[in-house]
Structures are given as C-alpha cells and as structure tokens.
C-alpha cells in the first residue's frame, strides 16, 4: 500500500514493482529514496522486549543474496 501512495505523491501512475519475483534491491532502494523525499521513513522494529537493534544485520544479509 505504501508503494501506491508514494508513487501517487510522486505523480507516477504506472506499475512499479509488478509483484513477487519482480522486486529487486534496486527497486526497493528507489522506493525508499522516493518515500524519504516525501518525508516517509521506515519505523524501527519492536518486539515484547523493546526495539530490535540488530535488524541492520538482517537487512545487510538480505542485500548480499
């Protein structure tokens, strides 16, 4: 849903990711850049014990695949 909202704010009314299998690291980074341009940022991850700090390592591992 965020992708649709961000693309509308950007004035881009065409399909972007195309769904499963078409989502690449480059497209995720582009979407993150466009969202940040409009003041939208990822919220920190939390569990019952509080904020999860090591999510950065999970993100890095995902990029390396």
Image: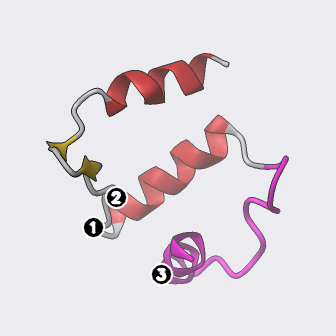
State yes or no: residue 13 in magenta: yes
- Cα–Cα span, label 2 and label 1: 5 Å
Residue segment shown in magenta = 1-22
Residue located at (50% from left, 73% from top):
6
Question: Which sits earlier in the primary sequence, circle 1 or circle 3?
Answer: 3
SS at mark 1? loop
- The type of colouring in the image is secondary structure
> Residue 61: percent from the left, percent from the top?
52, 19
Q: Which residue is the site of mark 3?
A: 9
In the image: residue 25, left or right of residue 21: left
> Residue 54: percent from the left, percent from the top?
29, 26
Q: Which residue is the site of mark 1?
A: 39
Evaluate if marks 2 and 1 touch, with contact meaning CB atoms under 8 Å apart.
yes
Evaluate if marks 3 and 2 touch, with contact meaning CB atoms under 8 Å apart.
no
Q: Report crowding for label 1: few under 14, some 14 to 19, many 20 or more residues within 10 A (C-alpha).
A: few
Reply above or below: 38 against 23: below
- Cα–Cα span, label 1 and label 3: 11 Å
> Residue 59: percent from the left, percent from the top?
46, 30
Residue located at (53% from left, 56% from top):
31
Question: Which sits earlier in the primary sequence, circle 3 or circle 2?
Answer: 3
- Quarter assignment of residue 15: bottom right
Q: Looking at the image, which is closer to me, 45 or 41?
A: 45
Q: Report crowding for label 3: few under 14, some 14 to 19, many 20 or more residues within 10 A (C-alpha).
A: some
In the image: residue 43, left or right of residue 9: left
Reply above or below: 38 against 30: below
> Residue 24: percent from the left, percent from the top?
71, 40
- Cα–Cα span, label 3 and label 2: 12 Å
Evaluate if marks 1 and 3 touch, with contact meaning CB atoms under 8 Å apart.
no
State yes or no: residue 36 in magenta: no
Residue located at (34% from left, 28% from top):
56
Q: Which residue is the site of mark 2?
A: 36
In the image: residue 1, left or right of residue 40: right
């Amino acid at each position: 849903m965020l992708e649709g909202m961000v693309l509308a704010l950007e004035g881009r009314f065409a399909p972007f990711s195309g769904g499963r299998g078409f989502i690449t690291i480059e497209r995720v980074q582009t979407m993150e850049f466009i969202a940040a341009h409009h003041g939208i940022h990822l919220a920190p991850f939390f569990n019952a014990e509080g904020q999860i700090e090591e999510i950065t390592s999970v993100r890095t591992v995902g990029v390396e695949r």
